[in-house]
Amino acid sequence: MVEAQTEQFLGVQSSSIGYGSGGALSNTLFKSSLIPWKLVARHELAKFEPAVNSNSGVSIKVITIIQTGKDNSTSYKPLDGELDESYNLTISTNGDARITAVSAVGILHALETFTQLFYLHSSGNGLYTNMAPVAISDAPKFAHRGMNLDVARNWYPVQDIKRTIDALAMNKFNRMHIHITDSQSWPIEIPALPELAAKGAYQTGLSYSPKDIQDIQIYGILRGIEIFLEFDMPGHTTAISLAYPNLIAAANAHPWDTYCGDEVNTNTYLLDPTVKSSDKAVIGPLIQKLVDRNHAALRKNGLTPIVWEEMLLVWNLTLGSDVIVQAWQSDENVALITGQGHKVLAGNYNSWYLDCGKGQWLDFDNGASFKQFYPFNDYCSPFKNWRLVYAYDPLAGVPAAEQHLVLGGEVHMWSEQTDPVNLDGAVWPRASAAGEVLWSGRQDASGQNRSQITASPRLAEMRERMVLRGIQAGPVQMAFQAHRVVSSQNLKLLRTPQFPNDARSRLEDVGACNLRHGRKFIRPMGGIVETVLEHSSPLNLAVAIVAVLAIIWNTTWLAEEIKVRRLGGHTRRAQTYLPFQLDLIGRAIHGTINHRNLQTWTHWFSTPKGPNYTVEARPLGRRLIFTADPENIKTILATQFTDYGKGKPFHEEWKHFLGDSIFTTDLDQWHDSRQLIRPQFIKDRVSDLGIFEEHIQILMKQMVKEGTTSDGKQGKPFDISEMLFRYTLDAATHFLLGRSVGNLENHEVAFAEAFGEVQKWQNIIARSGPMNKLVPRKQFFKHLKTLNEFVEPFIDEALALSPEELATKSKSDEGYTFLHALAAFTRDRKVLRDQLVAVLLAGRDTTASTLSWTFYEISQRPKIVEKLREEIIQHVGLERAPTYNDLKNMKYLQNVMHETLRLYPSVPFNVRLALKDTTLPRGGGPSGLDPIGIPKDTPIGYSTIIMQRRPDLTPDSLTFSPERWETWQPKPWQYIPFNGGPRICIGQQFALTEMGYTLVRLMQRFERVESDMLRRDGGNPTLKAEIVLQPGDGVFVSFYDRKGGEMSEK
Ligand code: HEM
């Protein structure tokens, strides 16, 4: 009996949705029901089933279905959350079966559950359930529960897509995302552009006509699955070139790895005659235009745009508030997206990419590449087993206040190595595990993560039911494991089962037993110690203590060793020669004191056979990893971001100086800081160049003064580096606090001295590691007090303004500072103090040192100075101050800065701590290509300076050559002076703007810059790597005014 509220749409009536027609229901129940032999103890099915002809149960004669709401056209293409999918299902003791739901789709879900309550009798004579009486009240946790199927890498006939829709409906998904085009093929027929499919499909006939698409969509609607198509762009579009070669840049361009790849490769635009640039600053606005245009068209047609996360997080595009962002790289990115107020679909590839673990899909010829890629794992290996899929939480790391923005998620089936033959087994039952997470949530009602122990039998049973309905899902477990004993009282309608003796319960019992043995074992040990104390001489006692320490040492080592091996394995050992690897510690101290860290690290990576860029050591028994391998650095900073962090020891060491700021915290606490600070670095704020101009004028005055000899001649060498540090302090305090400390003109500023001294002591504390407690702190705290006393009045002033006054100030822009912006969000003075000091530290020394290195290099290369000036003259002449856009358009200027940051990245050596047991992907095993086991609390030192100078990654890597950037692009993760991943430098644009502006203004004013460094350092600069990398001997140069003759104070 069906009471449904219906309305027509696309010729579809809601009463025909899913089982609504009744025939489908009985088909499923009677023809595809499960004989549960695997679910009961071996050979005991007969005990479980009701006896044939038994009268002890109750029969269901009628199913009452009531739809309480009314479907309308939006019910068939609802936005996420628009459709009520909940349902109630009861079967009473007298056999009344009743379903109520607001929508037809809710009824569909109820019927799906209903069929899954029943088993087929092995005699073939009817159905029974052991779950009645039952009352189920059910609703989905997430509004978007999807699967993405890529039909472009391999093509699927419509019937395979329909079968997948059937399986999705069984598992209560509600979205199917079809990745319909890619670089490999264009299988969708667009009537207005028939060539696209005619030439872009793999074969005539292997394409989808409009009718096919409509057919698939209606099939989906009838099963509660909304189908949407993805036309991926601007990457993934090479197939278009088969029909329209002029539309696609760099199609199949060689060398392949320079121009191609999966995601947008900026090098391709170098070959586009309308762009001719690989600069993100040029390409970004073009992508913005493309996206704006496409989204406008979609909206006009009543559709909601979806973008991949890169559009927001990499390209920083401005997106409409309706746009949904699809995240795939990390949980942190989900949080970054919600943090910007956007709706998001989760689907971290580390858990929900079903294609992973099948190995590389490219072939490698014998030789170097064969060796490099052996044993040919793919980028996202290993295979994501169902337990991992089930363990994924789409809300992980998202603050509670933003969780409503997570609409749900999708599992992804990319088809490089999947086609119709292995589709079902590749997707199911793993997608079922994701389906449960999306329907019910990762946590149960008590807030506990759902257990795989209880999920496993459910999933195994579901798999059996899917197979019966024509889905070739893989097995979840062996039949042996699946067997369990279930209660077999009653017959047609049995009670909810208990599974007291199932295999898993028994396993738990065994575990508990072992634990009890362990406890017993401890007691006699106490006895032994007491006996030793009573009967031993002091010598014996000393020997015993040493022996016990050795046992503890070895036991700790052993416990760690077991863990390392379980997680992955070891990488090569750094070369050391002394016991306890004391020489490694000695070298580290010597390297730091003598500014020879680069040489020290290079030594650790060296072997007689050439460098190993990931090594480990165990000085004094603590395992450390050093790496300059881009794959490992990417893992630490991005792909396994939550596994690594700054860690508690770092916070302890830095807390007095940087408090709980963005630099010293991890996870949620770090995320909150990032949210607070990020908006202050939007383009509008960063492109305000007035502050720099004010200070550059003072800088030039000082340069003229310092660069003039006593007899008034120009060209006297002076240390430009020291002056640049004072300049950036003035600019930074102006930007952050609204008032400069005026250190360019007054060298005796107490704050400047205190800031320098605090950094000096902080560096000593940080480098002393576990011995830092021995570092005297009197000077440190004295200078810290001066620093705090300087900052506090500014905070008082900002807090004296009411929120309304702060808001008005922000609109007028007059005197509005970074501090005001922060105060508009928080009135917590500690938060304000900590973040201010952190950004001051980050923003001041990094730009001063990079500018210093630029002058160090270009003052020895007149041709570069000449070329730079030519570009400046061409764009802005010798007088006009450049705008933000001028700076971005000066390619050579940008290349000079890139090249400086390549050879002299401001943070050349960095460290992260493993926050949990985890891995690094490369460096292990005999080939050095296997994963490495990383137990919790292992520190990983990583060096960007070594990586960016590696001769195998960058040609002629030690030469300073801005020209290289005209034809060369580093591969992803091989050049990261600003770091990468979620913790990428927030001030990157601010820094490039400040540095670019300073260089342009100085090069307009001075036509010659000559180095005086050769006679001071012989061409070997001292790389002083304290908190940032700076020239250890200063940068002594002579500047010559473009007018010649005497230096004038223009
Ligand atoms: C040449 C100039 C700069 C370079 C090379 C640089 C480099 C870096 C690097 C490598 C990090 C990551 C540190 C880590 O996580 O261990 C970082 C973080 C950061 N930088 Fe910069 N930076 C520069 C300029 C600036 C400027 C001018 C500002 C602000 C005015 C700034 C603000 C920040 C902030 C707030 C972070 C912390 C980000 C986070 O942890 O989420 N940086 N920077």
Image (cartoon, rainbow, N blue to C red):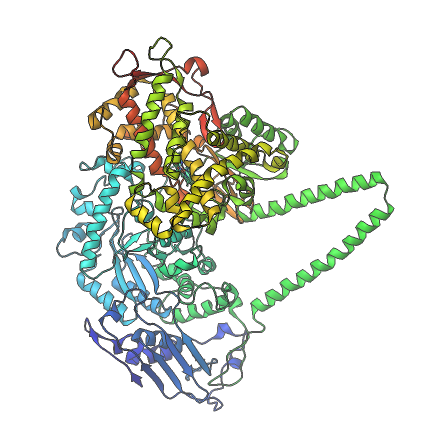
Residue 238 showing in the rendered view: no
Give the farthest residue toward the top.
711
Residue situated in front as seen by the camera: 943 or 883:
883
Give the farthest residue toward the bottom.
55
The answer to whether residue 692 is above or below residue 302 is above
Which quadrant of the picture is home to ligand 1?
A: top left
Residue 529 showing in the rendered view: yes
Res 119 → quadrant: bottom left
Q: Residue at image x 47%, y 32%? A: 751
Q: Position of residue 1008 (x, y in %)?
A: 30, 16
The answer to whether residue 164 is above or below residue 898 is below
Q: Residue at image x 67%, y 61%? A: 514
Residue situated in front as seen by the camera: 256 or 31:
256
Q: Position of residue 657 (x, y in %)?
A: 51, 39
Res 430 → quadrant: bottom left
**Horizontally, is 560 left or right of 927 in the view?**
right
Residue situated in front as seen by the camera: 235 or 57:
235
The answer to whether residue 770 is above or below residue 73 is above
**Horizontally, is 246 left or right of 306 in the view?**
left
Res 174 → quadrant: bottom left
Q: Position of residue 388 (x, y in %)?
A: 46, 57
**Horizontally, is 892 left or right of 339 in the view?**
left
Q: Residue at image x 30%, y 80%? A: 23
